[in-house]
Image: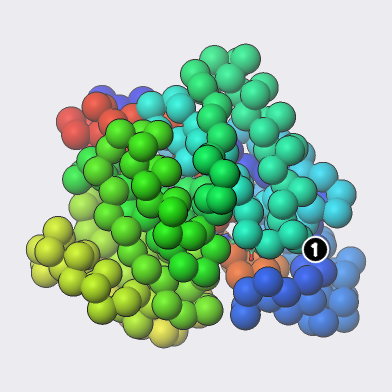
Amino acid sequence: MNAQAHILLVAPTHYTVSYAINPWMQPERWLQDTAGFAAQARRSFNALSEALRAAGCRLTVIEGEPGLPDMVFPANAGIVLDRRLLLARFRHAERQGEEAPFARAFAALRVAGVLSEVATLPEGVFQEGAGDCLWDAKRGLFWVGWGQRSNQASVKAVADYFGQPVVPLELITERSYHLDVCFCSLAGGEILYYPPALSVDSLARLRERVPAEQLIEATEDDLAHFSVNAVSVGRQVVMSRTTDRLRGVLTERGYQLREVDLSPFMMSGGGAFCMTLRLDRHRAAARHADP
Ligand code: ARG
């Protein structure tokens, strides 16, 4: 049996929407009710934490820092496999300040024995963590998104560091600025994805590796609900409130949905997946046990 999923979260104490680096972000709207949205963000965060616990996850919650509101999205801070962590390098100045506090948090997790190693990327590589690098436990490979944030050089950097197969996927639309907005590797081996976000070559690469019956297409409406940005733990899927359509599709396939109102975080362009970083991904265990 696989060990319990272990997830890092960042408390939304300093969360705001104060700039726009993706087309979903609404700083003007946030300004209309800063206190109200902050309170709502706290409630949403608590509901997400509860849903993850109910799905069987162990949580480690750290504090963010003032002036770094997007720290609530730790999926962007690094990639973890077999207790080895590759630190992210952010594309935008607005988020580059997160690198140092996340590096300190990961160093502490290494001291605590959760991680065994923390590494940095080569010069010239931008890579925004697990948000652009999804581990496919069933196939034993990384799906690596590049284009908007992570650059093409990140594909080789990930392959070199982890020594695992990687499949590059080029993101061609602004709305799917990270792979996890438009692509989700479900624990049963299905891939939930939004086809218009990927280049023609990338779609071909995906369809070569995943049989048609395991491909689930998301609609524009699913995307706008941040439903593809979901956390899949065994047969449970934790996600922001989804569409009737997708709820039906996933339930039909035997998944149990735990939906949470994440609207304050969607105002920053994020959903459930990017608010988490899975710390316990293991290559070997993944093949035999339910991930
Ligand atoms: N405002 C954040 C940004 O633009 C949202 C990040 C969401 N993370 C994700 N992995 N999709 O960077």
Specify the amino acid type for callout 1: Thr
Residue 151 horizontal/vertical position (percent): 48, 60
In which quadrant of the rendered image does the C terminus lie? top left
Can you say whether 252 is above or below 282 in the image? below
Residue at screen point 46% across, 36% down: 80
- Give residue 153's quadrant in the image: bottom left
Label 1: which residue? 16
125 and 48: which one is in front? 125
Relative to residue 119, is residue 216 drawn left or right? Answer: left
Give the tally of numbered discs: 1
Q: Position of residue 141 (x, y in %)?
A: 26, 45
Give the residue drawn at x 30%, y 27%: 2
Residue 268 seen from this side: yes
- Dividing the image into four quarters, tell me where ligand 1 lies: bottom right
Q: Position of residue 197 (x, y in %)?
A: 39, 77
Q: Is residue 257 above or below residue 291?
A: below
Q: Where, quadrant-wise, is the N terminus in this rendering?
A: top left
Residue 11 location, quadrant: top right
Mark 1, secondary structure of its residue: loop
14 left or right of 143 in image:
right
Residue located 42% across and 77% down the image? 172
Q: Is residue 196 left or right of residue 119?
A: left
Q: Is mark 1 within 8 Å of ligand 1?
A: no
Between 39 and 117, the one lying in front of the other is 117
Q: Residue drawn at (72%, 46%), measured in percent from left and top?
A: 98
Task: Residue 36: give x, y in percent of width and height.
Answer: 85, 69
Question: From where the camera sits, is residue 244 visible?
Answer: no
Is 264 left or right of 79, judged from the image as shown? right
Q: Residues within 10 Å of mark 1 (few under 14, many from 20)?
A: many
Q: Give the colouring mode of the picture.
A: rainbow
Q: Nearer the viewer, residue 226 or 178?
A: 178
